[in-house]
Image (tube, helix red, strand yellow):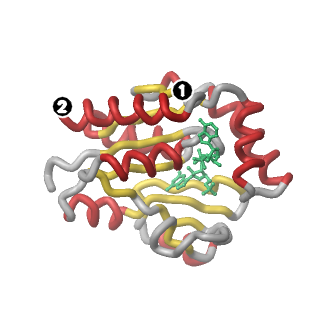
């Protein structure tokens, strides 16, 4: 669709963006999730082509050379993540708006390319300590990868004022309601 929009949710890892994006996909049928490509290991319960398009680092680098990404990043060493151009067109061609769950740099990059066609939302955790306890509780990370994510979070929190909106994810129910409100308002514009 020509009028297809982009909704971007970014935050430090563990802030709750995946939880919020899943909720929005359940309650706003006009949205479709942008499946990113990545080169990290698949986690238990994840599916290729559903959670991510899982590629080897070599396959990923080949697609970078072929200019197949709108944006990409080496988020952690040898762990590439990116948005394929074909993915956004696939969703717009389905008549849907695209919703992204990307890290802060990817989110700001997408916003700078799409300007008013995009709504960029920062999900703010109540504290760094809460990020750590949420990542532990999610049981997907090693002690080392939690430390790496927390190290990155301190810098990421400083970028919040560059987003169109910030949503505090303290009480989840409030965050879900706030997210629903800002996205619906943007889509009605
Ligand atoms: P992200 O996608 O930003 O890395 P997730 O959505 O995976 O974060 O959330 C990280 C963990 O924290 C998950 O286990 C999730 O269930 C939990 N969580 C999300 N929001 C809250 C909240 N408001 N209070 C407590 N736990 C939360
Ligand atoms: P995870 O390994 O927890 O799934 O994701 C690690 C980080 O990569 C998260 O902050 C996630 O939002 C980010 N990420 C996921 N997809 C993309 C993408 O397409 N582009 C960018 N730049 N980051 C992404």
Q: Which residue is mark 1?
A: 168
Judging depth in this view, the residue of 64 and 23 nearest the camera is 23
- Quadrant position of residue 58: bottom right
Measuring from the top left, give residue 93's x and y in whole percent: 20, 64
> Residue furthest toward the right?
143
Q: Secondary structure at mark 2?
A: loop
Residue 102 marker: none
Judging depth in this view, the residue of 108 and 164 nearest the camera is 164
C-alpha distance separating marks 1 and 2: 23 Å
Measuring from the top left, give residue 118's x and y in whole percent: 31, 39
Judging depth in this view, the residue of 62 and 178 nearest the camera is 178
State which image quarter holds ligand 1. top right
Q: Is mark 1 within 8 Å of ligand 1?
A: no
Residue at 15% over, 56% down: 1
Q: Is there any visible trace of residue 138 in the rendered image?
A: yes
Q: Which residue is mark 2?
A: 189
């Amino acid at each position: 669709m020509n009028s297809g929009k982009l909704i971007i949710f970014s935050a430090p890892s563990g802030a709750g963006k995946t939880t919020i994006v899943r909720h929005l996909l359940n309650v706003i049928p006009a949205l479709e999730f942008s499946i990113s490509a990545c080169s990290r290991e698949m986690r238990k319960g994840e599916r290729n082509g559903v959670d991510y398009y899982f590629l080897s680092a070599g396959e990923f680098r080949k697609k970078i050379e072929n200019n197949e990404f709108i944006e990409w990043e080496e988020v952690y060493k040898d762990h590439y993540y990116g948005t394929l151009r074909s993915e956004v067109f696939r969703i717009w061609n389905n008549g849907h708006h695209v919703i992204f769950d990307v890290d802060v740099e990817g989110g700001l990059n997408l916003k700078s390319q799409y300007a008013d066609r995009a709504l960029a939302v920062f999900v703010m955790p109540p504290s760094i300590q809460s990020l750590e306890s949420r990542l532990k509780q999610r049981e997907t990370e090693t002690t080392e990868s939690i430390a790496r994510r927390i190290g990155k979070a301190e810098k990421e929190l400083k970028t919040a004022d560059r987003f169109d909106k910030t949503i505090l994810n303290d009480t989840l129910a409030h965050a879900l309601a706030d997210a629903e409100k800002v996205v619906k308002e943007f889509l009605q514009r």
